[in-house]
Amino acid sequence: MKLLEVRNLRVHFALEGAAAELRAVDGVSLSLEAGHTLGVVGESGCGKSVTALAIMGLVPQPPGRIAGGEILFDGEDLLRQRPERLRELRGDRMAMIFQEPMSSLNPAFTVGEQIAEMILEHRKITKKDAKALAIEMLRQVRMPSPEKRYDDYPHRLSGGMRQRAMIAMALACRPKLLICDEPTTALDVTIQAQILELLRALREETGTAIILITHDLGVVAELADEVAVMYAGRIVERAPAARLFAEPQHPYTIGLLGSIPRLDRRRARLAAIQGQVPGSALRLDGCRFRARCPFAIERCHEDPLLMKLEEKHQAACWRAPL
Amino acid sequence: MLLRAENLVKHFPAGAGFFAGATGKVHAVDDVSFDIAAGETLALVGESGCGKSTVGRLALRLLEPTSGRVLLDGEDLQSLDAAALRQRRRTMQIIFQDPYGSLNPRMTVGQMLGEALRLHGLWPGKEPARIAALLRQVGLGEEHASRYPHEFSGGQRQRIGIARALAVEPKLVVCDEPVSALDVSIQAQVINLLQDLQGELGLAYLFIAHDLAVVRHIASRVAVMYLGKIVELATASELFERPRHPYTQALLSAIPVPEPGPRRSRALLQGDVPSPLAPPSGCRFRTRCPYARDLCSSKPPILEGGVACHFWREIAPPAPPAQRLMAVNERLTRLQAAFDS
């Protein structure tokens, strides 16, 4: 049974002074089984974060609007639920952590109070029990001296500790789905390693399914079972992680892998993808990558759909398999 | 030697509020020495707050050091008056992480480049031709001269920042996190451009970055900084293949490798970097070092033979990279070559 199934999701944004809308997410379908980790990679503006916000019911409307699609979570179609129902689900059965924990922690309350408050909102237990549970969560995210940290205000904590507090809050009600949006991007590399290790351990301990949104292919390789690559509002390739890195089929994935310098091998030159991601006004009909693609042919003026190449491996490219 | 930094120290007053006086000092840079030869790339790496950007500004004398000196072509920068310093500045330029913050929003790209030329009396009467050549050199077109910074994407703005640095024909460019704000595909374009320019113009780079994979790709030598001090300085191949300082080892093992599979065992560092307001006594890394002993808290190690650690000879080096190296994927290499034609 799928935990999450997103079908043909479309999220549009009104642009100031323009008649046309920005199609930030333009027909995205994805699915996730309980306990699995799906990595969603892509560059700025590809729609990966908006997809996550749509699943959480957090797209700001206006300027955004859900232009179509279905989001089935644990048997419920989230796009047809009332806002109160979504509020019940958020923090309880699904939760999200962000790049900058300071933006989601309230500076006026201690981290412990905020975790306890979140628990009280969703569980009928006493304040005393909620506090005990909050301390237990801080311990579970390997926060040193959790009883003391309970009374710390967010600004007293380092960036890594704040992210731990955020994860403790997100997992407090044992959600089935945890969405992590660039969870380590703002952190130094030694702290990033700690947080990735923690997420891996917590996934084992709790069985939470994870959607990991990131621009960093290294982070995806660390955690994801499956990967979806997004470009200009669409998923252009999806495959099990090992296969995506070993045998990528979409030219964008191939170019992206060639763009990153590697520690374990030195190359004379990086395979830079020419040009830049098309802005909203310049999005092409047909394949949106074709202007930057060295493999483009006449047929690329037609819209390529995600096509199955192998069991669980799909790419939206007329030239695939390359 | 093109540039030599000798025993640079920079302390900033801390806690200086409106009502309170300075209550301490931040030891931003403490006894840092290095040199850069013409045409080479020295990378300064380290995590936030290690002092690497401050070193870059001290090298250009954009900041005055608390003590120590910087020699450019053998000449002490501190001894120069303002006029002489301005003239020497031609030799050294800087590009920043956020080019938008360093470009005047009310000047066109052509005006900006023209101003740099006029300031130094370069190419008199031939400015437009020189500006066009500069723009082509960084992969932009002549037509971009009449546009304003906001009309460009992030990657193009970084190209403009590079063109402005090159306008005065420097020998050394300090690159302060030049690609960390850019998307991966754009980052690769700018890295390739910096490498091409170095080959064409014989530039030296002081390349300040936190991304070690980028540094491995571009640097000839690397200095690793931790809490204001250089803990290891070596050629790039030595440093990445045989890191000696325990901090360098931990830093390298912390980087995720874009290749799924069984995870390497990791020397995970515990805790956070201590405050530079009160750095630990002795070796500043000792509070997070798995090998620390009594001596490390009493005696600061000095940088000898490229490593500042009392016990580096006894510390087992990490598994040689040959064992970690994944097989090169020939199909992928062939397909990726198509992007570079």
Image (spheres, rainbow, N blue to C red):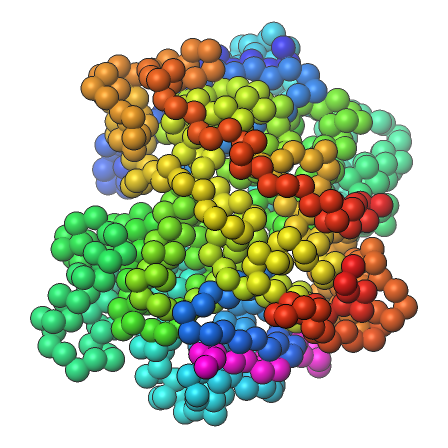
On screen, residue B1 above or below B94: above
Q: Position of residue A33 (x, y in %)?
A: 47, 74
Q: Residue at x 83, y 55 (%)?
A: A294
Residue B208 lies in quadrant: top right
Left or right: residue B228 versus residue B185 is left
Q: Residue at x 52, y 56 (%)?
A: A220
Q: Residue at x 49, y 20 (%)?
A: B233
Along the line of sight, the residue nearer the viewer: B71 or B42: B42
Left or right: residue A46 versus residue B310 is right
List the single residue furthest toward the top: B74
Q: Any magenta on residue A8?
A: yes
Magenta residues (range): A1-23
Q: Quadrant of the C terminus of chain A?
A: bottom right
On screen, residue A88 above or below B125: below
Along the line of sight, the residue nearer the viewer: A11 or B120: A11
Q: Position of residue A170 (x, y in %)?
A: 32, 67
Residue B168 lies in quadrant: top right
| Visible residue check, residue B111 | yes
Q: Position of residue A234 (x, y in %)?
A: 66, 71
| Visible residue check, residue B223 | no
Q: Residue at x 57, y 63 (%)?
A: A240
Left or right: residue B143 versus residue B111 is right
Does the magenta stretch mainly form a helix, a strand or a loop? strand
On screen, residue B5 above or below B151: above
Along the line of sight, the residue nearer the viewer: A178 or A311: A311
Q: Position of residue A25 (x, y in %)?
A: 62, 75
On screen, residue A186 above or below A306: above
Q: Any magenta on residue A90?
A: no
